[in-house]
Amino acid sequence: MKHSTDEPQMLDLGCGKNKRPGSLGVDVIWNEQIDVVHDLNHYPYPFEDSQFDDVLMDNSIEHLDSIVKTLEEIWRICKPDAMIKIKVPYFRSHYAIDPTHKHYFASHSLYYFDPRHDFHQRYKYSNIALFHVEEVAFDKDYGYTALQRLLMSGVRWLANKYPMRYEEYLAPLFPMHCIDFRLRVLK
């Protein structure tokens, strides 16, 4: 069943029990937060083309079978210039080793879908799913204690300012916990 455009314009994919207020929540197992029960590994998603202004995936995309197919489907159901927010565990984090995770992410993982970047120009995993990477941020909303915040503030600043250098030199010693990606749909 396709959901029409009179639904909320924000989609929370893989929301579980933490659906964002005002959004349409999708997950594979029903609970009181879920508006649409759907396995995100099955395509197409039950939504119309160019339906959503915003999509959120908070710790869910790493559980799916195909990042490329998932981003192509998100691209299909989003309006031009829609904002996609994806939060994932950083590959060096102890959260990344969850046995249900199928993919691991570093700071440049989603640049393969940005036509301005060398990764996309060289590999072109998708000619459908095109996004501008607007922001990549380590531990953006991570719940540090006051002491952790004090100890990690300089490392976090360096990681966000110079992500490639951080990953090469400091990440093995001072791993971040998560990465937030903000992508803008190109149509």
Image (spheres, rainbow, N blue to C red):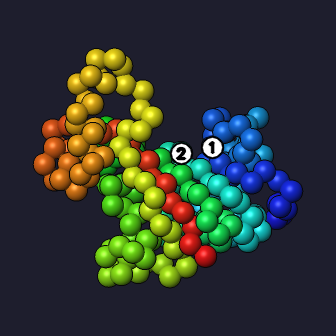
Q: Looking at the picture, tell me which residue is in the foreground, 155 or 62.
A: 155
Q: Position of residue 70 (x, y in %)?
A: 56, 65
Toward the viewer: 62 or 185? 185
Task: Say left or right for 117 vs 39.
Answer: left
Q: Nearer the viewer, residue 116 or 124?
A: 116
Q: Residue 15 got which mark?
A: 1
Asked if residue 108 is positioned above or below residue 116 in the image, the reply reads above
Q: Quadrant of the N terminus?
A: bottom right
- Inspect the image, locate mark 2, and give the three-letter code of the amino acid beneath it: Asp
Residue 86 x/y as whole percent: 50, 51
Q: Is residue 10 above or below residue 173?
A: below
Mark toward the start of the polypeptide (1 vs 2): 1
Element under disc 2: strand
Observer able to see residue 39: no
Query: Dot 1, how many residues are within 10 Å of its Cα: few (below 14), some (14-19), or many (20+)?
Result: many
Q: Quadrant of the C terminus?
A: bottom right
Q: Quadrant of residue 33?
A: top right
Task: Find residue 127 and name its label.
Answer: none
Residue 182, x across and y down, in percent: 49, 54
Q: Residues within 10 Å of mark 2 (few under 14, many from 20)?
A: many
Number of residue marks: 2
Marks 1 & 2, CB-CB < 8 Å contact? yes
Side (left or right) of 153 relative to 168: right
The residue to which callout 2 is attached is 58
Residue at point 50%, 68% (across, down): 131
Q: Is residue 166 above or below residue 155?
A: below
Looking at the image, residue 100 sits to the left or right of residue 8; the answer is left
Residue at the extreme top: 146
Q: Residue at 23% across / 25% down in the picture?
A: 151
Residue at left 30%, top 46%? 160
Question: Could you say where residue 62 lies in the image, as x and y percent from the top left?
Answer: 46, 53
